[in-house]
Image (cartoon, rainbow, N blue to C red):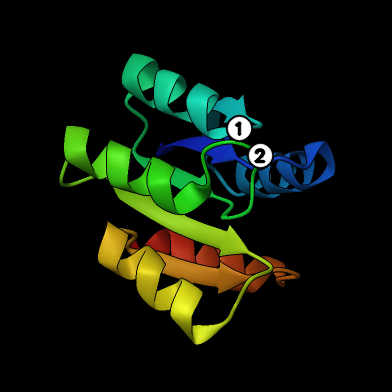
Amino acid sequence: MKTVLVVDDSAFMRKILKITLETNGFVVIGEAENGTTAVELYTKHKPDIVTMDVTMKGMDGIEVTRRIIKMNSNAKILIVSSMGQELVVKDAIRSGAKGFIVKPFQEGQLLEAMRKL
């Protein structure tokens, strides 16, 4: 089973991601509501996959992605964001994210993106 760290400043979105992932065979090993906690939990748990929001207070998801990739260049990070503008997507991919889906998403979109990782 693949382990997942869910990073999103919205408790509601974290809950949706957690339920969807766990229902489909993933193990959510941690949740972070901000970038600092995300980096700490990644360092502690070394999850197989990270779902990453872009817009968060303090350190945004793009910077968190850069920091995680600096620690582990093979990290699998899926950006899950309501910010689907081309510039944001390109910045996320340049930072090391391996995939990008836009909120609101369908369950199938999330699972397909996760399996591709």
Displayed quadrant of residue 101: bottom right
Image vertical order of residue 35 relative to residue 107, above or below: above
Label 1: which secondary element: loop
Q: Are marks 1 and 2 in contact (CB under 8 Å)?
A: yes
Mark seen at residue 48 = none
Q: Read off the residue under disc 1.
A: 34
Other-residue count near label 1 (Cα within 10 Å), few / some / many at <14 / 14–19 / ≥20: many
Q: Is residue 92 above or below residue 90?
A: above
Residue 77, x across and y down, in percent: 38, 51
Q: How crowded is mark 2: few (under 14 residues within 10 Å), some or many (20 or more)?
A: few
- Measured as percent of width and height from the top left, residue 43 is found at 33, 20
Amino acid type assigned to the residue bearing label 2 in the image: Lys
Which residue is at the far top?
Answer: 44
The answer to which of 78 and 34 lies nearer the viewer is: 34
Residue 1, position in %: x, y? 41, 36
Q: What amino acid type should be assigned to the residue bearing mark 1?
A: Asn
Q: Where is residue 85 in the image (x, y as percent from the top left)?
A: 57, 82
* Quadrant including the C terminus: bottom left
Residue at image position (70%, 68%) is: 103
Residue drawn at x 34%, y 59% is: 97
Q: Mark 2 points at which residue?
A: 57
Residue depicted at x 60% and y 32%: 34
Considering every residue shown, the one lying at the far front of the view is: 58
Q: Residue at x 30, y 38 (%)?
A: 67
Residue 93: quadrant of the picture: bottom left
Query: 26 and 86: which one is in front?
Result: 86
- For the residues labelled 1 and 2, the Cα–Cα distance comes to 7 Å
Q: Is residue 80 left or right of residue 11?
A: left
